[in-house]
DNA sequence: TTTTTGTTTGACATTTTTGTCAAATGCAAA
DNA sequence: TTTGCATTTGACAAAAATGTCAAACAAAAA
């Protein structure tokens, strides 16, 4: 994080790339397209980041870091479990309005050989989370299953509708407003489904 | 390897493209890469499909059709609801071994302006499915919610772990075998979660 | 046999995309 | 002012990817 003072344009380029990738889902935007979207000369991409790939890598790492922060936020919180989840859902659905394609982008990048960096940290974090989940199950607040499965249920129910939105929306024949409404209701649905209210 | 028969090559190219896209997740494979993987001269792609885009479109439409067939399979079946879902899960998890990245590919294509074709058919199909779901809810076999939300729960819980596998696997620190096992257990988890056993 | 037809190939042209570089610009410090 | 430094630019080079074409090829039909 604490690298050096990023110049304004450097940050602008990065942010624009993120916007194209995470917000608009244009995963293979060219350097020219990124530069245009940023209102900047294309060669500045080479100036600040040596190459297109380097830029892509940095954006990827940033996104990873963000995911890690998300995870820490939920695991280290002292709130009661159910409230933690609830709070996280608020946070997630808000974030997802800005960057709906973040998760799906990560997958495509990993598939193209982008190396995952913070494996250890995330793994450790998840282990803590598993313990918390297991405790809730013991107390009868959650249906019993492998904590990993609960985690996957959790992520699936929240992320998927956002990531797959264009496909779901088309196949369901929904307009933007209708689908927005569906997503609004989603938080309560997820809570009910996870906790079997 | 003598594929000299009539238009076997055309099919070969299509199948190879699908393999690269859906099985290996290489969404922006070049024509050369596709040709090489098929063991075929690159210009044959232009001969059978006029352009790269045309090939991509055809593969996309094929995949769409397949999704539609899947949908029909589940909706038109006369089995009791719960058994239909169970049967579908068997089918889905089996298919997903061949083409884990099918759904995610579709999303990226839609994002890049690929037009969705069988909108109405799918929409009609889903309407029928909603009725079936609503009936089950009336009968107390399912927790009450908008049928659309149940559908999304259903798809999310099944598709997501498969689509996002590389990312999940890395961040969970799982190896291939361990994650396979997790997916094996997945069917029962999905059933339990959907039906609140 | 020759002809026809559909298929395959390699060479070439074009387009798209990326990367390099020297010169220009602007701005702050000396 | 001049100097130094980071930034920005346009022209150019290089590479990557797609598309075209005439000719070669093979197998069936005439």
Image (cartoon, coloured by chain):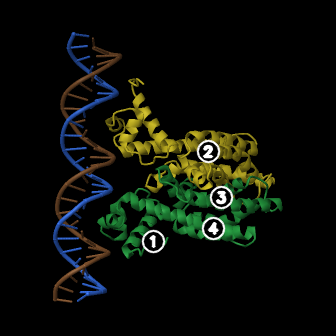
Chain colours: A green, B yellow, C blue, D brown
Q: Which residue is at a point 35% across and 37% down the rendered structure image? A: B45
What element does badge 3 sit on? helix
Q: Are labels 3 and 1 assigned to the same chain? A: yes
The residue positioned 54% from the left and 62% from the top of the image is A175
User: Circle 1 marks a residue in which chain?
Assistant: A
Mark 3–mark 1 CB contact (< 8 Å): no
C29 up-or-down from A61: above or below: below
In the rendered image, which residue does mark 1 sit on? A3
Q: On the rendered structure, is D15 left or right of B39?
A: left
Q: CB under 8 Å between callouts 2 and 4?
A: no
Q: Chain of mark 4?
A: A
**Element at label 4:** helix
Q: Secondary structure at mark 2?
A: helix
Rendered view: B70 above or below B156: above
Look at mark 2 in the image and give the residue it sits on: B71
Mark 1 surroundings: few (<14), some (14-19) or many (≥20) residues within 10 A: few
Up the image or down, A16 lies above or below B139; here it is: below
Count up the numbered dots: 4
Is residue A93 something one can see in this rendering? yes
Q: What residue is at 35 percent from the left and 59 percent from the top?
A: A51
- Mark 3 and mark 4 lie on one chain; the one further toward the N terminus is 4
Work out whether mark 4 precedes mark 1 in sequence or the reverse, and give the earlier one. Answer: 1
Q: Secondary structure at mark 1?
A: loop
Identify the mark at residue A72; answer none if there is no mark. 4
Residue that carries the numbered disc 3 in the rendered image: A157
Residue A62 screen position, x and y as percent: 49, 65
Q: CA distance from mark 2 to mark 3?
A: 20 Å
List x then y, in percent, for residue B64: 52, 45
């Amino acid at each position: 994080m604490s690298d050096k003072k990023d110049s304004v344009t450097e940050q602008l380029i990065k942010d624009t790339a993120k916007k194209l990738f995470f917000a608009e889902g244009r995963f293979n935007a060219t350097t020219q397209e990124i530069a245009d979207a940023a209102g900047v000369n294309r060669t500045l991409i080479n100036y600040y980041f040596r190459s297109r790939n380097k830029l892509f890598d940095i954006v990827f790492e940033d996104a990873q870091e963000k995911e890690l922060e998300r995870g820490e936020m939920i695991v280290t919180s002292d709130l009661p479990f159910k409230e933690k989840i609830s709070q996280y859902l608020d946070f997630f659905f808000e974030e997802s309005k800005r960057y709906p394609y973040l998760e799906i982008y990560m997958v495509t990048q990993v598939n193209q050989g982008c190396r995952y960096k913070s494996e250890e940290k995330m793994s450790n974090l998840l282990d803590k989370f598993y313990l918390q989940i297991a405790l809730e199950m013991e107390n009868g607040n959650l249906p019993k299953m492998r904590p990993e499965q609960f985690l996957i249920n959790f992520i699936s129910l929240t992320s998927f509708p956002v990531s797959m939105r264009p496909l779901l929306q088309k196949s369901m024949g929904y307009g933007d407003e209708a689908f927005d409404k569906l997503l609004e209701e989603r938080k309560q649905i997820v809570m009910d489904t996870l906790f079997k209210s």
